[in-house]
Structure formats: C-alpha cells, structure tokens
C-alpha cells in the first residue's frame, strides 16, 4: 500500500446517515450567537455594574479623611504657633533690680516671677532665713554650722507660725567670708558658678529619686513613687524643703553645704529656682549671662528665657558678679521659691 499523506476515507455507514439533526444545528447556532465567556473573572475590571462607583466613593472618603487629618494637624500647628506668639508678646510679670556693694567688689542683679503655690513660705524665708543666719553666734567662726542650724531653726519657726497650712519653699543661699564662698541648698533651687568660662554646679538638686535621698526617705518609713515625676508619697516632687508639715518626717530642711575659695578665675555666680533650671541647662545660663552687660540685665534675660520656653514654675534668679580688684569681706543674697 502506498501512502501519500492524504485523508483516509471513512469506512462504515454512509455520510448521509451521519448528518446532524435540526435540533443539534439549532443548539450550535445558539451557542455561536452567545458572547464568549471570559477565561478568568479576575481579568474583568468590575464584577458588578456599581463597583466603579463604590470604588470612587471609597477613594473620596479616604481623601476626605486624609484632608481632615491634614487640616487638623495644620490647625493644631497654627494654634501652637499662635500661643507661642502670644507668649512672646506677653510682658513677663516680674520684680527685678540690682545691687552693688559699697566697695564695688560685688555687683548683683535679680529678677523674679511667680508661677504657683503662693508666696507665704517664700516670704517668710525672705524675712527670717538670712536674719537668723546673721544673728547666729558662729556665723563667722563656723559658717557651715551656722548655716545648717539657721536653716533648721527657720523651718521649725515657720511650721509653728503657720499651724496646719500645707505650704513650703526651697532655698539656695550663698555667703562670702573673705575669699571663701559657702553655698547652702534645700530643695531643687540651684547655684551655678562660672569659672574660667565653665559652668560648675555648686549644689545637687534634692530629688526623691536621687539614690541617697530615696534611701533616707525609705529608712524613715516613707515611699518614693512615680506620679508624672518621682514624688515623696506620690505628692511632693522634691525630697527636702521648708514647711510641708504633712511630709515633714521625710521632707527635711537640712541643707547640703559646699565651700570653696574664690580666685581670679571665678567670674560670676547664678542662684535660681527650678523654674529656670527646668528649661535652661547650666551651660546655657552661663552663656546667656556672659552675653549681657550687667548682672541685672542678665538676671532679667534668664527669667524671660525661662518664661518663653514654657516654664510654669516660679522663676527666681540672682546673678552676682565678682569684681576681684575690689574684693573684700561680704555676703551674698539667697533665692527661695514657694
């Protein structure tokens, strides 16, 4: 048999007998008239005639949320800027002034603005603390003991005078005897000295979480807990203070005292309450003082800077300039806060 690659004729029934029925032809024509089915439904743009509109509505809602969030952020930013601008334009309600020793050896400036808590305790200290110190028989011979005892006496006298009123104050005091400087501190006021351009802290803030202070409080039966900041019994954010009768067992008025000799490298001393130190680092304060022509201008500038930076606490600041060519025996004032 030869083979030429053609189609082999079908053997069996005749072609007429294999012809399709009219019904089959009709079904075939109907199938041919229908549109083709998609191979995958995922390939279609939408499964429902309303889906494009739903997608558009969802996008519009998302854009609206983004726009609202942006507008809220913008409003908040504008409000903050407005508040800052208003604070910038406020006049700081303070008391300020200057003082110079008769021999010109010390030049002093001060500035103060009240933040909270009233002035009763601070006013009492202003009237009695330094007076008690000057009257102490060991003021010149044993200045450190005189300062310590005067602090404790003033605290006891204040508690007796005020009865059950729960108010208190901190204090930082500097005394110059010859060329010897004594700095006493109770609370979170602070003394900072500028020596050869370097800021040197002369006191260590009495904070409840200071390890030695926390141990002293706990040994006395008290507790130090976190309540926005570390507080004695969850109440007071300092571990030493005048007054505060309710916590007196733990919050003492025993000062820590530093003493050092003043030489030609010591330029000035800053005594201030925590209303300043909470927002102005020691080094910045020293730099700001150097930039001013007088201690009075420097003290006022420091108070204004603390206020502008958002301090809501009492801001009391004293700047004392040492004029070494005229240095003789003298004493320096003290800071306190309510």
Image (cartoon, rainbow, N blue to C red):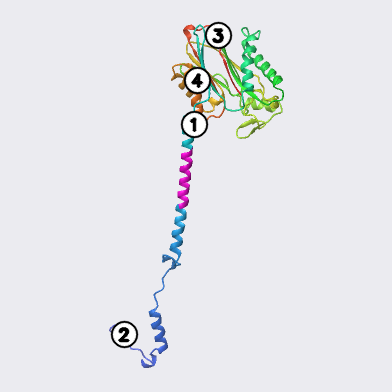
Q: Is the residue under label 1 in contact with that under label 3 (CB below 8 Å)?
A: no
Within 10 Å of disc 3 (Cα), the crowding (few <14, some 14-19, many 20+) is: some
In the rendered structure, does residue 69 fall within the stretch colored magenta? yes
Q: Say which of marks 1 and 2 sits in front.
A: 1
Q: Which residue is mark 3?
A: 330
In the rendered structure, does residue 73 fall within the stretch colored magenta? yes
Q: CA distance from mark 1 to mark 2?
A: 102 Å
Q: CA distance from mark 2 to mark 4?
A: 114 Å
Q: Is residue 109 visible?
A: no
Q: CA distance from mark 3 to mark 1?
A: 39 Å
Q: Position of residue 163 (x, y in %)?
A: 72, 23
Q: At 63% across and 14% down in the image, what residue appears?
A: 147
Name which quarter of the figure residue 144 lies in. Answer: top right
Q: CA distance from mark 3 to mark 2?
A: 131 Å
Q: Position of residue 246 (x, y in %)?
A: 70, 27
Q: Which residues are magenta?
A: 64-79
Q: Position of residue 143 (x, y in %)?
A: 62, 10
Which circle marks residue 7 in the picture? 2
Which circle marks residue 87 in the picture? 1
Q: Say which of marks 2 and 4 sits in front.
A: 4
Q: Is the residue under label 4 in contact with that under label 2 (CB below 8 Å)?
A: no
């Amino acid at each position: 048999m030869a083979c030429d690659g053609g189609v082999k004729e079908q053997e069996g029934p005749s072609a007429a007998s294999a012809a399709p029925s009219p019904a089959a032809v009709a079904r075939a024509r109907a199938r041919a008239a229908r549109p083709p089915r998609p191979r995958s439904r995922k390939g279609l743009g939408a499964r429902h005639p309303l889906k494009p509109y739903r997608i558009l509505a969802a996008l519009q809602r998302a854009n609206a949320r983004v726009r609202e969030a942006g507008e809220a952020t913008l409003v908040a930013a504008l409000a903050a800027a407005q508040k800052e601008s208003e604070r910038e334009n406020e006049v700081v309600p303070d008391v300020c002034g200057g003082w110079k020793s008769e021999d010109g050896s010390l030049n002093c400036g001060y500035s103060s603005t009240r933040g909270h808590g009233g002035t009763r305790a601070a006013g009492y200290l202003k009237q009695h603390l330094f007076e008690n110190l000057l009257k102490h028989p060991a003021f010149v011979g044993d200045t450190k003991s005189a300062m310590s005892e005067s602090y404790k006496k003033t605290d006891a006298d204040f508690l007796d005078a005020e009865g059950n009123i729960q108010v208190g104050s901190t204090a930082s005091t500097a005394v110059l005897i010859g060329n010897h400087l004594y700095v006493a501190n109770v609370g979170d006021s602070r003394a900072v000295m500028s020596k050869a351009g370097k800021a040197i802290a002369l006191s260590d803030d009495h904070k409840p979480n200071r390890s030695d202070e926390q141990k002293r409080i706990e040994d006395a039966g008290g507790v130090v807990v976190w309540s926005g900041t570390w507080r004695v019994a969850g109440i007071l954010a300092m571990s030493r203070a005048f007054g505060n009768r309710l916590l007196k067992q733990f919050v003492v008025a025993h000062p820590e005292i530093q003493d050092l000799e003043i030489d030609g490298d010591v330029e000035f001393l800053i005594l201030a309450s925590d209303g300043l130190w909470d927002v102005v680092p020691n080094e910045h304060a020293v730099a700001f003082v150097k930039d001013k022509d007088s201690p009075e201008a420097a003290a006022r500038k420091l108070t204004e800077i603390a206020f502008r930076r958002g301090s809501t606490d009492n801001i009391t600041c004293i700047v004392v300039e040492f004029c070494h060519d005229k240095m003789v025996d003298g004493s320096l004032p003290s800071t306190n806060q309510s």
